[in-house]
Amino acid sequence: MINFLYAITIPGGLGNIVFPNTRITNPTDLIANILFTLLEISAVLLVVIIAYAGITYATAGDDTNKTEQAKKTITYAIIGLIIMASALVITRVVISVLSRGTLN
């Protein structure tokens, strides 16, 4: 069994961040952890984008351009949420199949 180190190197000489509670024993676990980390980062960005669009919408007043732009941003953020949820489901199914060979 090969143990893989899961660490992030931060530019600027800050060193490595190692996740000690994450045990990676094969490449599938490594890929899964990277994908789930990317999905978590995307979820945080999605919340920030929706908050920004909501503030823009609330402060637009009579400016129809700002109102329309905020509505489009919220719509695109919801589409992004649907894509992220689909990616999560697909990732879990693929990892399940690769790990065990079944969908159980």
Image (cartoon, rainbow, N blue to C red):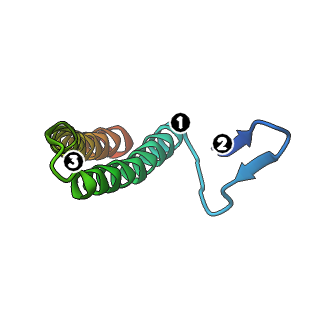
Residue at the bottom extreme, as displayed: 21
As drawn, the label of residue 4 is 2
Callout 3: SS: loop
Residue at the image point whose x is 40% and y is 45% from the top? 42
Kind of residue at badge 1: Pro
* Mark 1 crowdedness (10 Å alpha carbons): few <14, some 14-19, many ≥20: few
Residue at the right extreme, as displayed: 13
Percent of width and height locating residue 18: 71, 53
Cα–Cα span, label 1 and label 3 = 19 Å
Q: Are marks 1 and 3 in contact (CB under 8 Å)?
A: no
Which is nearer the N-term, disc 1 or disc 2? 2
Which is nearer the N-term, disc 1 or disc 3? 1
Q: For the C terminus, which image quadrant?
A: bottom left
Percent of width and height locating residue 69: 21, 37
Residue 102 visible, this orientation? no
As drawn, the label of residue 27 is 1
57 sits left or right of 39 in the view: left
Residue at the image point whose x is 22% and y is 44% from the top? 70
Cα–Cα span, label 3 and label 2 = 25 Å
Q: Are marks 3 and 2 in contact (CB under 8 Å)?
A: no
Kind of residue at badge 3: Leu
Callout 1: SS: helix
Residue at the image point whose x is 69% and y is 45% from the top? 7
Q: Nearer the viewer, residue 70 or 79?
A: 70
Q: Are marks 1 and 2 in contact (CB under 8 Å)?
A: yes
Residue labelled with disc 3:
103
Percent of width and height locating residue 60: 23, 50
Name the mark nearer the viewer: 3 or 2.
2
Q: For the N terminus, which image quadrant?
A: top right
* Mark 2 crowdedness (10 Å alpha carbons): few <14, some 14-19, many ≥20: some
Residue at the image point whose x is 35% and y is 42% from the top? 95
